[in-house]
Amino acid sequence: MDWSVIVEYKSYFITGFINTIMLTTVGVLVGMVIGLVLGLMNLSGKWWLRTPAKVYVDIFRGTPLLLQILFIHFAVIPTIWESMGMIPPSALFSGFVALSLNAGAYIAEIFRGGIQSVDKGQMEAARSLGMSHGQAMRYVILPQAFKRMLPPLGNEFIALLKDSSLVAIIAVYDITYAAFTTAKNTWERWAPYLVAAAMYYILTFVLSRVVFWMEGRLRTDAERSEQP
Amino acid sequence: MIRIENLTKNFGSVEVLKGINAHIREREVVSIIGPSGSGKSTFLRCMNLLEPVSGGKVIVDGHDLTDPKTNINEVRTEVGMVFQQFNLFPHKKVIENITLAPMKVRKQTKEAAEAKAMELLKKVGLADKAHVYPEQLSGGQMQRVAIARALAMNPKVILFDEPTSALDPEMIGEVLSVMKSLAQEGMTMVVVTHEMGFAREVCDRVLFMDGGVIVEEGAPEQLFKNPKHERTRAFLSKVL
C-alpha cells in the first residue's frame, strides 16, 4: 500500500472534505426550510395545501437519491437554464439542489411527526387565550416540537452526510470523488478509499457527539430553572 | 353575556348536542352537571368555538361566533378557559405561561405583563413559583397557574372544563377555593364539574344535562333538593 499518493493528491482530498461538509450543511439547512413548509402544509386542513406536499414527499422518498441526482443534473437544471438562454451551472450546484430537495422530503416527515407529537391541549390552550393559529404554532407548538425533532434531525444530518457521496456520480468533487480520482490516477487500490472512509467516519462521529450534547442541553432546561 | 340558541353538534353521525338554549348572565356563576357522555364538556367548548358547532348560534358579548365574519381570536381574549388537564406550556416558566398571551396578543410590555402576572400569582398563592417550570409543580398548583393565566387576559367570563377532575383529592380544595374567591369578586363563570358541593355552595344556577339536552335548570337548592325530572333525580341519587 502506497500512502504517498495521499500526500501527492492532498489538494483533492481537502477540496473533497470541504465540499462534502458544504453539501451536507446546505442540504440540511435548505432541507429544513423546505421541510418546515411541507410539514406545515401536510398538517393543513386544506386539501390543496396537503396534496402537493404529500406528492412531493412521496416522490422524493419513493425514488432513489442517485436517480434524483442524475435527473436534476442532466434533465431538470439544463432544461430550465437553457430555456432562459443561459449555460447550466456546475455539477456542484446540481448536487446542492438534489440533496436539499431530497432532505426536505425527509425533514418534512420529521417536522410533521414532531408537531403531531405535541399534545392537542397545547393548541387549544393557546387558541383559548386568543392567539391566532400562527402565533400558537410559533410560540407554543414549534418550540416543543423542535426538541422532539432533534434526535431524528441529527440522524437525518448523519444520513445525508453519507448519502452526499452519491453526487460523485456527476463528478462533484466530494470526498468520494477525490478518492475515486486518486485511485484511478495512481493505481493505488487501498489508501485513497481508506482515507475517504476515515474522513466520513470522523465527520459522522463528531456530528453524533454534537447532537448528543445538544439533546443534553435541552433536557436540562427544566433543571436549570431551580429557584434562585 | 353568553347566549346559546338552538345549538347542535355532531361528531360524524353521532349527535352530541341536540338543540341547546341557554343564557349566561353577567356576574353569574353557572355550573353544568350531568353523567359522562351527556355532552356537557362539548357544550362548554362550543362557547369559545374550540369545538366547531354544527348548527345554531353562540353569541358572546354581542358577537355571534358562528358568523364567519366574527374575529374569533378577538372574542376568545374575552373568554378565558381552564382545562381538566391544565395544558400549561411545559417549555415556559410559570410567569412566562402567564405573560405570553398578554404580550403577544394584547401587545403589553414585558414589564406590565410581568407585574400583572406577579399580582395574579399572589392571588392564587404561588408568587414563589414564578420562575420554575410547570413540571415542578403539583397538579393543584398547575391548575392555579392555569387560572392565573386565564385571568391575565382580563376576560369577561371564564369557562372551566372539569377543573378538578384530574387532581388528587387533597388538591381539589385549593383549586376550588381560588374559584370561590373569583366567584365572590363577581367573575362570570361557567363550570362543568363533578363537585356537587361546589355547585351547591358557590353557583347561582345549575344546569343538568343528559343525552345532549339540558334536562333541567334552576337554583342549586331547588335543583338539588327538589329535582323535577326523573332523570335528574336518578343522577343526583348516584352522586350525592
Image (cartoon, coloured by chain):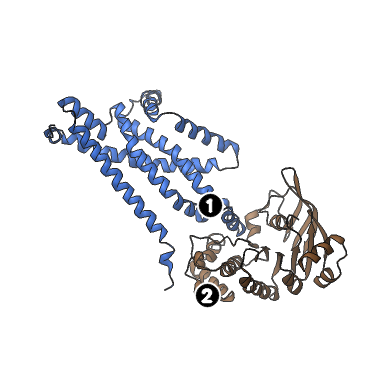
Chain colours: A blue, B brown
The residue pinned by badge 1 equals A118
**Does residue B11 appear in the picture of this structure?**
yes
Whether residue B92 sits left or right of residue B162 in the image: it is: left
Give me the disc on residue A171. Answer: none
Label 2 sits on residue: B127
A225 up-or-down from A183: above or below: below
Residue found 73% across the figure and 73% down from its top: B202
Q: Disc 1 on helix, strand or loop?
A: loop
* Vertical placement of residue B28 versus A10, above or below: below
> Residue B73's spot in the image, x, y percent?
62, 55
Residue B175 appears at what percent x and percent y? 63, 71
Q: Is residue B34 left or right of residue A32?
A: right
What residue is rendered at 39% in x and 27% in y?
A: A72
Q: CA distance from mark 1 to mark 2?
A: 28 Å
Left or right: B185 as drawn, with respect to B139: right
Q: What's the amino acid at mark 2?
A: Ala
Q: Position of residue A111 (x, y in %)?
A: 48, 45
Amino acid type at circle 1 is Val
Q: Residues within 10 Å of mark 2 (few under 14, many from 20)?
A: some
Name the image quarter holding residue A1: top left
Q: Nearer the viewer, mark 1 or mark 2?
A: 1
Residue at mark 2: chain:
B
Q: Residue furthest front?
A: B238
The reply to whether residue A173 is in sight is no
Quadrant of residue B201 in the image?
bottom right
Query: Which residue is at the front of the view, B221 or A32?
Result: B221
Same-chain status of marks 1 and 2: no
